[in-house]
Image (cartoon, rainbow, N blue to C red):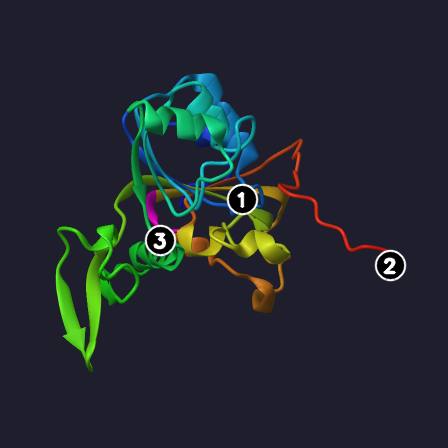
Amino acid sequence: MSSKIFKNAAEALQGITDDMTIIFGGFGLCGLPENCIAEIVKKEIKGLTCISNNAGVDDFGLGLLLKKRQIKKMIASYVGENAEFERQLLHGELEVELIPQGTLAERCRASTAGIPAFFTPAGYGTEVAEGKETREFNGKMYLLEQRFYADFSIVKAWKGDTNGNLIYRAATRNFNLPMAGAGKITIAEVEELVPAGELDPDQIHTPGIFVKRIFQGEKYEKRIEKVTVRSRE
């Protein structure tokens, strides 16, 4: 069996080329595969269709790819914190597909599970339903949504082992969990890479069978998107 271990992001991203569809884990600025995003910027890969909960901010996350005009189409559920995203959208420079957040998560999970499509009530009666099959179940209307078909899925975990098993820390589980395994090839960058057998099996969130490549990242910025503190009064 070939090794899943790669030295760094540059090696792990082998095979990613222009015009591919890539799923990126993370929620807001939490749990982002920072090393892989930086390497894609460096490689100047263009024409990408990016599937993610959001588009980051202007100088962090997928906002770095937007700034370099490397994204052709953005599929997301929330994009309100990125001024460059807004500018490109309003000027017709970027294709955008907005999806209800729960539907986005389920379309990723369906890809991981091999489910081709599913029915959901989210979006019925709105622009989200245009061109989609609808059906009534027990008096309620539902939309047929299809799984995502992506070339790569890139996620970030707290710990991982050499077999590809992953553990996410706290809120970083967010979209990383349903997205791990949602692409033809899943790449995981982790803060700490340990030998197989060192992780407690009861604590593993993503089994290694879903991960094809893994490497230990470095220099995580871990930004806080909006600082909210409680008054001392």
Q: Nearer the viewer, residue 55 or 217?
A: 55
Identify which amino acid the numbered label 2 is placed on.
Glu
Q: Provide residue 58's location: percent of width, then percent of height.
A: 52, 27
Q: Nearer the viewer, residue 58 or 188?
A: 58
Task: Return the residue at label 2.
Answer: 233
Left or right of residue 152, residue 43 in this image: right
- Of callouts 1 and 3, which one flags the residue occurring earlier in the amino acid sequence? 1
Task: Return the residue at label 3.
Answer: 104
Identify the disc placed on residue 28. 1
Q: Provide residue 1's location: percent of width, then percent of height.
A: 40, 46
The quadrant the C terminus occupies is: bottom right
Identify the disc placed on residue 222. none
- Discs 3/2, front: 2
Magenta region, residue range: 180-184
Is residue 141 depicted above or below 170 in this figure?
Answer: below
Residue lying at the far front in this picture: please name it. 233
Label 3: element kind: helix
Residue drawn 60% across the image and 65% down it: 203
